[in-house]
Amino acid sequence: MNTTVQTISTKQLQQWRAHGHEHAILDIREAHEVSVSKLSDFHIPMAFCLSRQSEIPREIPVVIYCRSGARSAATVSALSTKHGFSNLCSLEGGITAWAKDIEPGMEVA
């Protein structure tokens, strides 16, 4: 069984956004974290991702992110293994890396 989780760098995601590459960005952090900063309005807390998997697109790439990348990697792995997703990737370093690399000064909870 392949347990490797596909990832995307902050720079690659920035390029996707800048060039209109079709994708969705799913925030799996808790509500109090999302209230401080976010990259998109698509939010399903990690604890509900498996039960709400029908809300996650399968026809376009979906970038899943959390604070540091650990929760998103676990979520990509679980959704891929249990529900057969093949279009998911985890944002390397999460929103913390995004704030450092792309949007200095962004507050992260």
Image: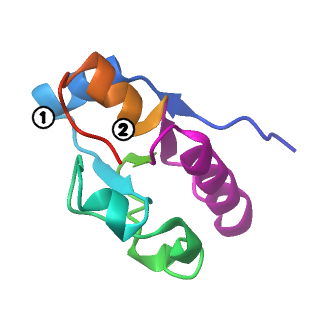
Please name the residue that numbered disc 1 is placed on: 20
In the shown orientation, is residue 40 left or right of residue 44? left
- Residue lying furthest right: 1
Q: Earlier in the sequence, mark 2 or mark 1?
A: 1
Asked if residue 62 is positioned above or below residue 41 in the image, the reply reads above
Quick one: 48 or 85, which is closer to the camera? 48
Q: How many marks?
A: 2
For image coordinates 17% across by 27% down, the residue present is 105
Q: How many C-alpha atoms fall within 10 Å of the one at disc 1: few (<14), some, or many (≥20)?
A: few
How far across and how far down the image is residue 25, in percent? 31, 50
Residue 52 showing in the rendered view: yes
Whether 60 is among the magenta residues is no
Q: Residue at x 73, y 58 (%)?
A: 81
Residue kind at label 1, given as amino acid type: Gly
Magenta-colored span: 66-92
6 and 34: which is toward the camera: 34
Residue where numbered disc 2 is placed: 95
Does residue 42 appear left or right of residue 109 in this picture?
left
What percent of the width, then of the height, locates residue 92? 49, 29
Farthest residue to the bottom: give it: 51
